[in-house]
Image: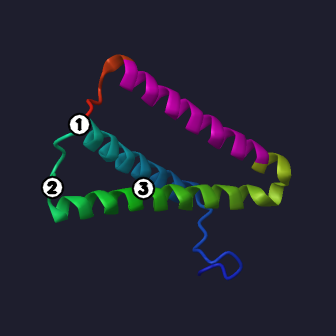
Amino acid sequence: GINAEYGYLPCKKPPVLGVLTLWSVVIASVIIFTATLSPSPWLVGTTGGSILIVLICVAWTGTTSYIKVNVASTLQPYGENPLMYCGVVTQLGSCVGAVVIFLVNKYARAFTPC
């Protein structure tokens, strides 16, 4: 059930977290693909298109946040070091992602300005 202390539905099963991670990657791929279609992505200028993009972004943010919280809560009983390393890996992943997107944008010209 819902964890009253934290206010969310905990999941510590690696296969479930793996499926959620895969789902998060699929959603992120849709977001990036949509960005490459700029300035004319799907349903551009329509209410349905705006709602769809917002829902996709909310789904990705919610899924990745849920995964991060569950990984951290799984590591919590093992002390501070695993949580610190989890935070370090999370920050390194963000840094690597930012550098990759920067390089793709700067040198491959994958994204064109509007």
Q: Position of residue 54 (x, y in %)?
A: 32, 60
Q: Quadrant of residue 73?
A: bottom right
The percent coordinates of residue 68 (x first, y second) are 60, 55
Residue 2 located left or right of residue 26: right
- Could you tell me the amino acid type at mark 1? Cys
Q: Is residue 90 left or right of residue 107?
A: right
Q: Is residue 23 above or below residue 37?
A: below
Q: What amino acid is found at the position of numbered circle 2 in the picture?
A: Gly
Residue identifier under label 1: 114
Relative to 99, 56 lies left or right: left
C-alpha separation, residue under disc 3 versus residue under disc 2 = 22 Å
Dot 3 or dot 2, earlier in sequence? 2
State the quadrant of the N terminus.
Answer: bottom right
Q: Where 31 sits versus 70, above or below? A: above
Which of 47/20 is in front? 47
Name the mark on residue 45. 2
Circle 3 or circle 1, nearest the eye: 1
Number of the front mark, 3 or 2: 2
Question: Which residues fall within the magenta stretch?
Answer: 84-106
Q: Which residue is mark 3?
A: 60
